[in-house]
Amino acid sequence: MALIVQKYGGTSVGSPERIRNVAARLLATQAEGHRVVAVVSAMGGVTNRLIELASEVTAGAKTTEREMDVLLATGEQTSIALTAMAINSLGGSACSLTGAQAGISTDGVHTKARIANITPEKIHELLDGGQIVVVAGFQGTTTDGSITTLGRGGSDLTAIALAGALKADLCQIFTDVDGVYTCDPRVVKDAKKIEEISYDELLEMASSGSKVMQSRSVEFAKKFGVVFEVRSSLNNNPGTLVKEENMSMEAVVIRGVSLERDQAKITISGVSDVPGVAAKIFQRISDANIVVDMIVQNVSRTGIADISFTLTKAELGKAKEVLEPLVSQFGGSAKLDAEDGIAKLSVVGIGMRSHSGVASQMFQALAEAGINILMISTSEIKTAVIIAEDRIDQAANVVHRAFGLSGATA
Ligand code: ASP
Ligand code: MG
């Protein structure tokens, strides 16, 4: 008998029929002789709708974050009750628990709380009584009893953390895709499902656009060694296993290719090559809470340098606004240029640590397709380029093929 944690996302519980499907799956798992804990998200679209309602009643003013959490937690509270009812109506025996009832304590940082500890006695008690325990994802409680939420996508974190605290034998994240793919199958038709991926690779792929799970929950899984599987709630296909890397994983040079659209670039040219210039620029950017991705500074000639960086297109306006006054202060030949219509293509794989030539192979594939590279950045397990957005689909396909991801099973 194994203890299994199964998490079902918003699409998987998105309608009464889908909830009945989840209930039937949970019962089938229990019928195989296992102890079953379910973690469910709010029904698809509900969290967004609650956020909209909040902004309507406050006429766009800043909402009180404590109240926001009370509001958002209702989404998951609805789905645990409905899921437990559906299980019971199918002849099973289920009990729903809010985050607080499940023993999930967090710090007091409303809307993005961190889990402090989990005391799962109640869950064990119910499991001992033969029940399926249905826990609300995304929420917890402070020690003084305020409801908190764990940041968007936080049900993943609830599932991973519970699996760790309960020492579960298996943690399955059910979603509306079959697992993690070598590239977005909507872009690369012959992308393959990846059987096994390391935590670090999944994190890099998520940060470069292939979002299947909340990044915080993958970091948590890595820290506590929680192995989990990402798979579909709509079929019985095996999914992708996410775990610590091993030697055989290194044999594959590139695990996947990810793409991120809607990027933008700012170049500040003609600034003096003296200490403090970059500090001033990025201080303004961070004060405005803008997230920067790649940063490139050229080698200065005659004491003048250019600094470029990328950010999301949505934040371009705000970035220009905070930087333009600074650029005028710089005076001289300093000038700001902003550009959107660009995208990022990344290849990710832990095998890159032990194989050379990845960057050149990627650049060669792009060159043969006549695709111009605007910027390049690398990490230990990733090589990324910025290119024109209207070439990104083609670029993903040629690079995917160049690394043999289209033919072989990954
Ligand atoms: N319902 C929350 C959200 O939409 C949490 C989750 O689905 O994981 O972000
Ligand atoms: Mg989700």
Image (tube, rainbow, N blue to C red):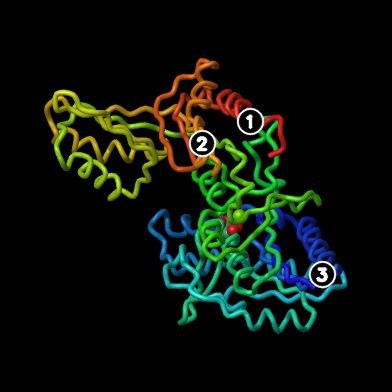
Element under disc 1: loop
Left or right of 310 in this view: 49 = right
| Picture layout, residue 14 above or below residue 71 | above
**Mark 1 residue type:** Val
Residue 137 in the image, given as x and y percentages of width and height: 61, 65
Residues tagged 3 and 2 counted as in contact (Cβ below 8 A) = no
Please tell me how crowded label 1 is: few (under 14), some (14-19), or many (20+) other residues with Cα within 10 Å: some
* Viewer-side residue, 185 vs 404: 404
Question: At which x and y percent is residue 397?
Answer: 61, 26
User: How far is the residue under mark 2 from the one under mark 1?
Assistant: 12 Å
Image point 80% across, 58% down: which residue?
21
Task: Tell me the quarter of the image containing the N terminus.
Answer: bottom right
SS under mark 3: helix
Q: Which residue is mark 1?
A: 187
Above or below, 50 against 293 in this view is below
Q: Is residue 57 left or right of residue 320?
A: right
Q: Which residue carries the number 2 mark?
A: 260
| Lower sequence index among marks 2 and 1 | 1
- Report the Cα–Cα distance between label 1 and label 3: 38 Å
Q: Tell me the element at label 2.
A: strand
Sequence-earlier tag: 1 or 3: 3
Q: Which residue is mark 3?
A: 30
> Can see residue 335?
no
> Residue 153, labelled with which disc?
none
